[in-house]
Amino acid sequence: MAAVEKVERLLSLMNALLGAPRAISADDLRTRVPGYPDEDASFKRAFERDKDDLREMGVPLLVETIQGTDPPLLGYRIRKQDYELRDPGLEPDELEALNLAAAATGFAGGVGQRALFKLGGGASAAPQAELPADPNLVAAFTGVAERRVVAFGYHDLARVVHPYRLEFLRGRWYLNGFDRVRGEDRWFRMGRIQGPIEVTGEAGAFERPLEAVPGLQLDPWVIGGGEDPVTARVWFDPAVAHSVRADLPDAGIEQDDAEGLVVALAVTNRDGFRSWVLGYLDRAEVLDPPELRSSVVHWLEQAVAAEAGE
């Protein structure tokens, strides 16, 4: 139980610090974050350990002088631009909807059960709805925080992973780590993990990369995918070429002229790729490979048949 309570306290501490408009003193955090000891010396030891744990996890914890304090008082915060992923390019109304959902949603429970971890909301925002916490999330966070190996099923394959970090993106949690089965770094969508996550072995079982772990790619033809990669070639009408180039800074451009734009993409999520291409309607066409083109055409034929009631 003690280990779970510490994980919950770290989640709450991150929530309080993330995006705070100004640095927060240790005394203020003591009152905001449930689970700290009442005795002063015990609180200081626990707080110092929590700061070390966050830094060890790669969380960019800032220590700053709180403005307007005399004598100067140190405080703590996490700047969102240092911790969050790159801008996904959402429209203003989409951002507003996400902010509203984040402010209105939290996890159920309290100390010893579930931490109140608002999904992107400010430290002072009170959740209006509660969601049950996922035991797998607590297990994954434990693995990240303590550098312990985790084991779980994914795409019908038993995985053994060195967990590096967790990301919350577009309403879902993702785990990043070194997959010992595949022999490479991978992202795992928590909702697709099969069975419970098992935290195994001793703490400090592996070393994290010296460089910061890169954020999760938001590209729909990659995100959440675990399929064998295939290179797709797609043609775009010149009328949408400008927006496509802006969305695909790293894509291989094979043609860009009055006849249209042709790009090459590494696809590991075929469903996401299909949805993205169809968003351009008749201004996009899958050229290669033949099997990927055929799957898109087949899906369209089925959709037309279903619409016609056949």
Image: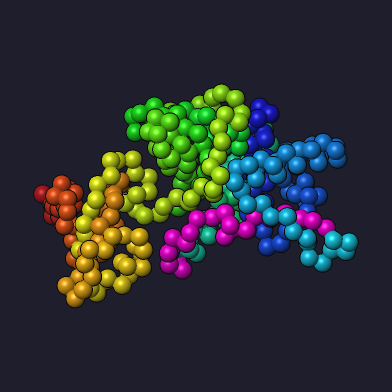
Residue 22 point in image, percent of width and height = 71, 62
Q: Residue at x 37, y 45 (%)?
A: 224
**Name of the residue lying farthest toward the top:** 201
Relative height, residue 259 to residue 308 (above, below): below
Could you tell me if residue 240 is visible in this image? yes
Residue 211 point in image, percent of width and height = 54, 48
Could you tell me if residue 193 is visible in this image? no
Q: Residue at x 36, y 63 (%)?
A: 249
Colouring mode (rainbow / by chain / secondary structure / one colour):
rainbow
Relative height, residue 274 to residue 174 (above, below): below
Q: Is residue 206 left or right of residue 171?
A: right
Residue 128 point in image, percent of width and height = 59, 52
Q: Is residue 139 left or right of residue 253?
A: right
Q: Residue at x 65, y 44 (%)?
A: 54
| Viewer-closest of 231 and 199 | 231
Image quadrant occupied by the N terminus: top right
Is residue 226 inside the magenta stretch?
no
Q: Is residue 26 left or right of residue 105?
A: right
| Stretch in magenta | 73-93
Q: How many marks?
A: 0
Image quarter of residue 256: bottom left
**Name of the residue lying farthest toward the left:** 310
**Name of the residue lying farthest toward the front:** 210
Q: Is residue 7 left or right of residue 164?
A: right
Relative height, residue 187 to residue 180 (above, below): below
| Viewer-closest of 186 and 170 | 186
Residue 294 point in image, percent of width and height = 14, 49
Q: Residue at x 33, y 40 (%)?
A: 226
